[in-house]
Amino acid sequence: MKNRGFKTLNEVRREHIIKVLNATGWNIKKASAILNVTESFLKKEIRQLKEPVIDDHTIKKDNQ
């Protein structure tokens, strides 16, 4: 069955994570607080993104 223009839950999840990360300047601590997840969980989610992340951002060690 076609998605009829709807996004999958994974697409929505990915977009939301990236939106929050961009809004926080890719500050993992702030983004994880907004998303109400642990920092380690958020880092895992970022690593699992299928496509390269926009703006060449990487996880900054110690949230610098």
Image (cartoon, rainbow, N blue to C red):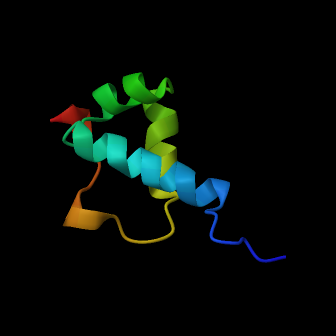
User: Which residue is more in the foreground, 58 or 53?
Assistant: 53
Residue drawn 61% across and 63% down? 7
Residue 40: tell me if it is visible. Answer: yes
Residue drawn 22% across and 34% down? 63
Residue 47: give x, y in percent of width and height. Answer: 46, 56
User: Which residue is more in the foreground, 38 or 54?
Assistant: 54
Q: Is residue 25 found left or right of 35 in the rendered image?
A: left
Residue drawn 47% across and 34% down? 40
Residue 22: give x, y in percent of width and height. Answer: 25, 47
Q: Quadrant of the C terminus?
A: top left
Q: Residue furthest front?
A: 4
Q: Is residue 60 found left or right of 28 in the rendered image?
A: left
Q: Quadrant of the N terminus?
A: bottom right
User: Which residue is more in the foreground, 55 or 40?
Assistant: 55
Residue drawn 24% across and 40% down? 23
Q: Residue furthest right?
A: 1
Q: Is residue 23 above or below residue 2?
A: above
Q: Residue furthest bottom?
A: 2
Residue 60: tell me if it is visible. Answer: no
Residue 29: give x, y in percent of width and height. Answer: 31, 27
Give the number of callouts: 0
